[in-house]
Image (cartoon, rainbow, N blue to C red):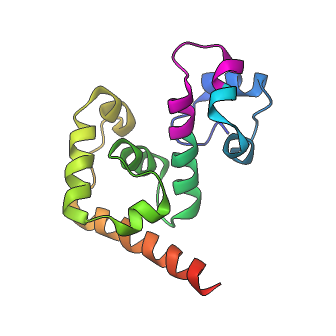
């Protein structure tokens, strides 16, 4: 779980105490129950839910990094379906707004936000994932 977006060694240690060792464990959590069990004021159900969405996006959409997943969730993307249905211009604007925040700056770690072409590629990848699901 330490390799999941937004989760470093310190947070992984806190999650380990409640039995979360893998991304699958993270995805299986009920955010409200996990927040109560962790008993750390800055880790609440909303944060845990964001971690779950970030991990699911990063694990499902090809070529989507953990940082990209953080930016997408910060811009309001909650699922692969949301990403597949997004308008590239609108999504890039949302990413830029998030990137200007302290959380966005922390996620980017000094990197530049993605350009329009990169955002469009993420949307196309999410659409490919959806098409594959629909074909199955």
Quarter of image, res 23: top right
Q: Nearer the viewer, residue 35 or 25?
A: 35
Q: Locate the C terminus and report the quarter of the image it occupies.
A: bottom right
Q: Is residue 78 above or below residue 132?
A: above
Q: Per the image, is 115 magenta? A: no
Q: Kindly identify the residue that appears in the image at 51 percent across and 64 percent down.
A: 61
Q: Is residue 25 left or right of residue 116?
A: right
Percent position (x, y) of residue 54?
51, 47
Q: Kindly identify the residue that appears in the image at 58 percent across and 30 percent down.
A: 8
Q: Is residue 105 left or right of residue 10?
A: left
Q: Kindly identify the residue that appears in the image at 57 percent across and 48 percent down.
A: 55
Q: Locate the N terminus and report the quarter of the image it occupies.
A: top right
Q: Is residue 131 above or below residue 76?
A: below
Quarter of image, res 19: top right
Number of callouts in the render?
0
Percent position (x, y) of residue 25?
75, 42
Q: Is residue 113 above or below residue 48?
A: below
Q: Kindly identify the residue that appears in the image at 34 percent across and 70 percent down.
A: 121
Q: Is residue 78 left or right of residue 134?
A: left
- Which residue is at the far right? 19
- Can the viewer see residue 12? no
Percent position (x, y) of residue 115?
23, 58
> Magenta residues: mostly which secondary structure?
helix
Q: Per the image, is 38 magenta? A: yes
Q: Magenta stretch: give its range.
A: 35-50
- Can the viewer see residue 57? yes
């Amino acid at each position: 779980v330490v390799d999941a977006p937004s989760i470093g060694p310190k947070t992984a240690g806190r999650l380990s105490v409640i039995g979360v060792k893998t991304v699958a464990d993270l995805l299986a959590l009920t955010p409200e129950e996990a927040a109560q069990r962790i008993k750390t004021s800055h880790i609440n159900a909303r944060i845990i839910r964001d971690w779950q969405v970030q991990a699911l996006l990063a694990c499902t959409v090809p070529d989507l990094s953990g940082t990209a997943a953080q930016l997408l969730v910060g811009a309001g993307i909650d699922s692969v379906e949301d990403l597949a249905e997004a308008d590239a211009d609108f999504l890039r604007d949302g990413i830029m707004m998030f990137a200007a925040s302290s959380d966005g700056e922390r996620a980017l770690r000094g990197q530049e936000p993605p350009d329009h072409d990169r955002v469009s590629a993420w949307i196309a990848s999410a659409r490919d994932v959806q098409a594959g699901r629909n074909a199955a």
